[in-house]
Amino acid sequence: MTRIGFALSLGTAGLILTGASRLAVADQSTAGADAKQEQQIQAQFQKTPDLKHDQIDVKVDDGIAVLEGTVDTQREKKEAQQVAHVDGILGVNNRLQVRGAAK
């Protein structure tokens, strides 16, 4: 009976370790995709005449882009949100502030 219990313990430990390693690989691939999307969004901002001189920080987490910084007009804020929708982006959290806008 102890041999069976030992075998079951080893099998359970193996399953736990296998599951944990798969999660680690998934986290790494997600982080890589997030970084790629951040770069794509920044590149799009640099191609957009109204946005290329604005200071916009982009962070992506699981397909959600977060925009922070300042822009000159409300129109630029809306344009930044639209431009940030690159492939793989599920949504945009637009936290951009408009310079000179009343709080």
Image (cartoon, rainbow, N blue to C red):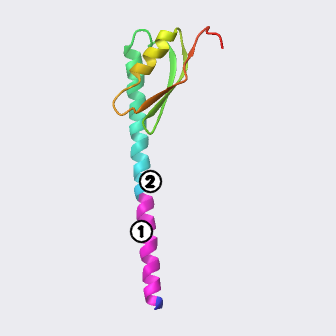
Disc 1 designates what residue? 15
Q: Secondary structure at mark 1?
A: helix
- Residue at 44% from the left image edge and 89% from the top image edge: 3
The label number, if any, that marks residue 24 in the structure image: 2
Nearest to N terminus: mark 2 or mark 1: 1
**Main SS class of the magenta portion in the image:** helix
Q: Residues within 10 Å of mark 1 (few under 14, many from 20)?
A: few
What x and y, as percent, mark residue 6? 46, 83
What x and y, as percent, mark residue 72? 53, 8
Instruction: Write down the region rendered in magenta.
Output: 3-21
Three-letter amino acid code at disc 2? Answer: Ala
Mark 2 vs mark 1: give the one in front.
1
Comparing 54 with 84, the one in front is 84
Outermost bottom residue: 1
In the picture, the quarter occupied by the C terminus is: top right
Three-letter amino acid code at disc 1? Answer: Leu
Magenta segment: does it hold 47? no
- Residue at 47% from the left image edge and 78% from the top image edge: 9
Q: In the rendered view, tell whether residue 62 sits above or below residue 72.
A: below
